[in-house]
Amino acid sequence: MVSKTQRASMITFGCLVLTVIWFVSYTLTWKVSKLHVAYPGSSLSNELLFRVPAIPLGRENNSCLVKDGESATKGPPKKQRIPKKRWERHFQQVLGRFPVNFSSEFRNPCWYEGTELQCVPYFYQLGSYKCGTTDLWDKLTQHPDVLPVAKEPHWWALRRLGYTDTPIHKDLVLHIRNETGQDDDSSVQWYLNLYKNQSVELIQKNPKLIFGDASISNLWGLGIYNWKEHFPNQTDPPIFLSDLIHAVQPTAKITVILRDPVEKLWTTYMLRRSVTQDSSTFDTYTNRLIKKAAKCESIHTPLYCAFTNEARPVSPLRNQKLYQGVFFLYLREWIEVFESKNIHVLRLEDWKSNQINELERLIKYLKLDRLPTETLTFIVSQSTTNVNKKARKRNMTMWQSTRKKLQKFYRPWNQHLSELLKDQKYRWDY
């Protein structure tokens, strides 16, 4: 029979053993290991990933980490959105400038400030470089109730935060800047003056009229770019442009046009001015982008890599060409706040094959009056705008080996996109 003294000794010894095991486990967890760290959805192969310090898998701000053997095809888990009450104080100059409710007198969101009418876009058209945004816009604005305002003011994602370049609409931008009386275009008043100059008077005469904003930068825009300063505990961007626009216009119409990301990257590359561009240089360019993405994802999540331009935060994401085709990461942020039922998505491939059908569907979504078949036929019979004539003239094709590399990168992301949109065609058959 075990005496009380022996029992006490056994208990003490057991506790000591458990303490040693706990200490060793804790030390090994933080030790730099050779364990591969992958992010769900990332299509970067393990050999491209770098060794990184292993981090305890239970930490909330590393929810994108995947354990060995866990499936990487489930899609990145949804991160908890920061409540509006925690971030709205950073946007008082914007949020405080818009009304809680818009006037019911107009179809377009407008309101009176005294006797002066102010208006903001009825819809936002999202897209990316060489996805057909210009052709879709030009044909949609031929509907008699859609005003053909300047397509891409880039206010929400860029000008609001100090961007002053004028790659498009230069004369209009400078005119509104002078009219607003500021050195830049960051104020809400600049944005309101932009549309006052083009559309408000017409809307007052015809309350059925609407207008939109088709700035491609809206797709990947952030609510705040110096978020690390205000949210130091966050490892990913905490506030997206979708959050901010939804706070101002919760019923805004959101339209999106996408394209096979492999073809998009190829076409965008062929727009470059260099005369040395060919299939070989594109292959080199592709390898460089994939290597750069691997380096970023060895330190950060794909979400961080897709939205962050550390070299020049407030600028078009021109150095994020590879991620610009990871539509899932961008579109998910819009769908989470506006819901998929309130967003209309189409593909450039479908737009090319049946413009009348796609235009009719878009008109219906925007709740505009239907157009006669003859009118639709006339609209779509016009020349396609903003075609990449340089690529056509060069008459070059992508190497199959390059295509396969890019398809391997985009395949899991397209899968996540098709699941998000509940439509297999967004896998683009690869």
Image (tube, rainbow, N blue to C red):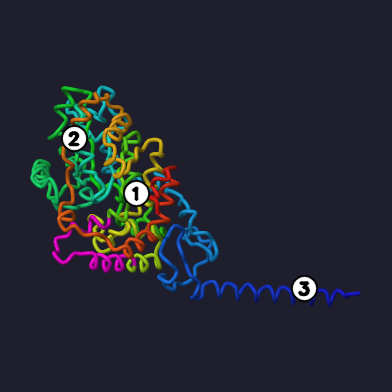
The quadrant where residue 303 appears = bottom left
| Outermost right residue | 1
Please report whichever mark, 1 or 3, sits nearer to the chain's N-terminal start. 3
Alpha carbon separation for disc pair 1 and 2: 38 Å
**Disc 2 vs disc 3: which is toward the camera?**
2
**Residue bearing the label numbered 1:** 240
**What amino acid does circle 2 point to?**
Ser
Q: Is residue 19 magenta?
A: no
Residue at the image position 23 percent from the left and 35 percent from the top: 120
339 over 409 or under it: above or below: above
Amino acid of disc 1: Phe
**Residue, disc 2:** 381
Q: Which mark is residue 11?
A: 3
Q: Tell us which disc is closer to us: 1 or 2.
A: 2
Q: CA distance from mark 1 to mark 3?
A: 55 Å
Return the x and y of residue 388 as percentages of the image width and height: 18, 51
Helix, strand or loop at disc 1? loop
| Circle 1/circle 2 CB separation < 8 Å | no
Pick the front one: 398 or 132? 398
Task: Magenta stretch: give its range.
Answer: 265-290
